[in-house]
Amino acid sequence: MLELLKKGFYTGLGLALITKEKAEELAKELVMKGELSEKEGKGFVVEILKKSKEAEQEFKKKAETLVYNAIKKIDVPSKKEFTAITQRLAILEGKIEDLKNKIAK
């Protein structure tokens, strides 16, 4: 099962990384071998690039989800939480400074 998931992942990654030049090269090769007509070759390139873009977006989405889950799992505060803590700390530092000034008087 894990091997199947790996293969699917690598296939998706490979499709996400295909360039227009590589797609055109593959289509040209298939046309030369007689496996595709010129028209089919052009349609093939368009379809491959479309699928490549879709695979890239799906890969990014999955990667973001994995990173988000990993960060949550190790309990790293979000930027919003960190900003709130920083603001609270600044307020407390201000209050401590006020108390120091009152004591010094």
Image (tube, helix red, strand yellow):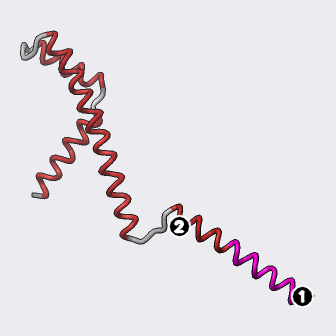
Residue plotted at (23% across, 36% down): 15
Asked if 12 appears above or below 79 in the picture, the reply is above
> Percent position (x, y) of residue 76?
45, 68
Asked if 15 appears above or below 104 in the picture, the reply is above
Residue plotted at (55% across, 66% down): 82
Q: In this view, does 33 lie to the left or right of 41?
A: left
Magenta stretch in the rendered image: 90-105
Please check the rendered image and state whether residue 103 is part of the magenta-colored stretch, yes or no. Answer: yes
Quadrant showing the C terminus: bottom right
Relative depth, front residue between 85 and 76: 85
Q: Is residue 79 left or right of residue 3?
A: right
Relative depth, front residue between 99 and 37: 99
> Percent position (x, y) of residue 19?
30, 28
Question: Where does label 2 land, which residue?
Answer: 81
Asked if 59 appears above or below 21 in the picture, the reply is below
Q: Mark 2, residues whose alpha carbon is within 10 Å: few (<14), some, or many (≥20)?
A: few
- In the picture as drawn, the residue positioned furthest to the top comes out as 38
Please check the rendered image and state whether residue 6 is part of the magenta-colored stretch, yes or no. Answer: no
Question: Where does label 1 land, which residue?
Answer: 104
Judging from the image, what secondary structure is the residue with disc 1 in? helix
Q: Is residue 30 left or right of residue 82?
A: left
Image quadrant where residue 60 sits:
top left
Q: Which amino acid does label 1 sit on?
A: Ala
